[in-house]
Image: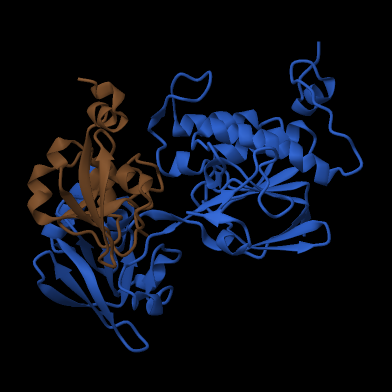
Amino acid sequence: MNKIDALIIGAGPTGLFTAHQLKLIGLDCEIVDNLDKIGGQCIELYPDKPIYDIPAIPECTGEELTNNLINQLKPFNIKFHLSERVDEVKKEKDNWIVKTNNDKIFSTPNVIIAGGVGSFEPRKFSVKECEKFENISLFYSITDKKIFKDKTVTIFGGGDSALDWAVELSKNSKVNLIHRRDDFRAAQATVDKVRKLAKDEKINLLTKYQMSSIKGENKLESIDIKSDDDEIKTIKTDYVLGFFGLIMQLGPIANWGLNINKKTIKVDTEKFETNQKGIYAVGDICTYPGKLKLILSGFHEGALAARACFKLARPNEKYRFEFTTSSKTIKDRLGVKGD
Amino acid sequence: MFLHTCPIFFHDYIYPMTKITYITHENKSHTVDVQNGLTVMEGAVQNDIPGIDADCGGGMACATCHVYVKEDWLDKLPKKEDGEEDMLDMAFEPKTNSRLSCQLTVSDELDGLIVNIPSKQT
């Protein structure tokens, strides 16, 4: 079990700056994120899109902002737990016991939810029966490509993941690639490769089709696909892969007894605390009268929540406000020389 | 002549409104006045019409403000920009009349527009 002063859920800009604020005032913290990389929406949704409203930074991309925040955290040794989703939170005396989907356990008086609009998860097929085959013969990501050898694999999607895997698996499997329209949004070189493989009959390319049903008793047998003008085709297949990008879901947070309205969590504006003592929400996921969903608001909220954490993490000490320009203690923590 | 003293008229004069109808999955129809210049997505969110999540807030970075446009409106709407069709690939059950409502800016030309909201966004 990891005993820490504060646990941050979410490694987006708000989570990162909140960690900085905690470390600056002498508290230790760790960060959990469901994605496999640091940066949250900035990295997953708009790494190349310029942002113009970060104070003192006239223009930067989502990726640059993330890298700058990571740089700002360099003096501190912060432990990141990536590809981990927080599943369970329960109270034990004065601490919250937090458990992830991989059974990592944290014990902490402070949990700061900086979860944006929730955790990123693969978008699934809309056909309900697909659940029955999920992780058996229907997948949204690939961990072991060997299982597809000499089998028929039907891939849905029109982005890089779908096309890259179609090219890769066509070497050793019979591949059907199905997409809802003629255009693909993958890299042009990959699209060209797929079209060539389709021409050479190495990939069976079917466009303007979507899945309409999936069949099989214990084992997947076939799927039906339907065109825009309601023409139905049946395809025999051993495996189905769906690559429709990621969606954001609040996930297990919804069951923690917090005051949730429209995917946001109600907090006060002094500590950014939720209706549960020691659980805070900052950034896009929190709401209060006048809330602005801006990155700069997240920074402010994180700074205040960090101060609130001090009280619960160090009940016998008094928090003293200090400036980074003048405090020797802070300079020591940052590893910079004082004047 | 004293138009400016009449608050309602004055408001309309500065902020022209356009009627947009949203039909939910349960077939409930909501017709609301949306200020020109806002998007069809914002019109739904500001009027508490259920079924439009708009997770990314209008950045064309998610597909959770997805709507189906009544067929006869399809040609009258502004054309899809690059990227909208890409995002629609990730929408729940996209069809040929699918649009992202954050990309539809309300104007006089859209008066009477009817959009259907899908059964879910994610």
Q: At x 42% / y 36%, what residue is drawn?
A: A47
Any part of residue A92 in sight: yes
Vertical comparison of A11 with A217: above or below:
above
Q: Residue furthest bottom?
A: A217
Q: Nearer the viewer, residue B23 or A119?
A: B23
Any part of residue A70 in sight: no
Task: Report the coloring of the rendering.
Answer: by chain
Q: Nearer the viewer, residue A294 or A233?
A: A294
Horizontal arrangement in the rendering, residue A175 relative to residue A134 (left or right): left
Which percent across, then down, holds residue A151? 30, 75
Q: At x 74% / y 20%, what residue is drawn?
A: A324
Q: Quadrant of residue A306?
A: top right
Q: How many marks?
A: 0
* The hue in which chain B appears in the rendered picture of the protein: brown
Which percent across, then down, holds residue B17? 23, 37
Q: At x 83% / y 20%, what residue is drawn?
A: A328
Q: Residue furthest right?
A: A316
Q: At x 55% / y 56%, what residue is drawn?
A: A260
Horizontal arrangement in the rendering, residue A74 relative to residue A294 (left or right): right
Which percent across, then down, holds residue B102? 29, 43
Chain that the image shows in blue = A
Screen quadrant of the C terminus of chain A: top right
Q: Nearer the viewer, residue A254 or B28?
A: B28
Screen quadrant of the N terminus of chain A: bottom right
Which percent across, then down, holds residue A140? 39, 64
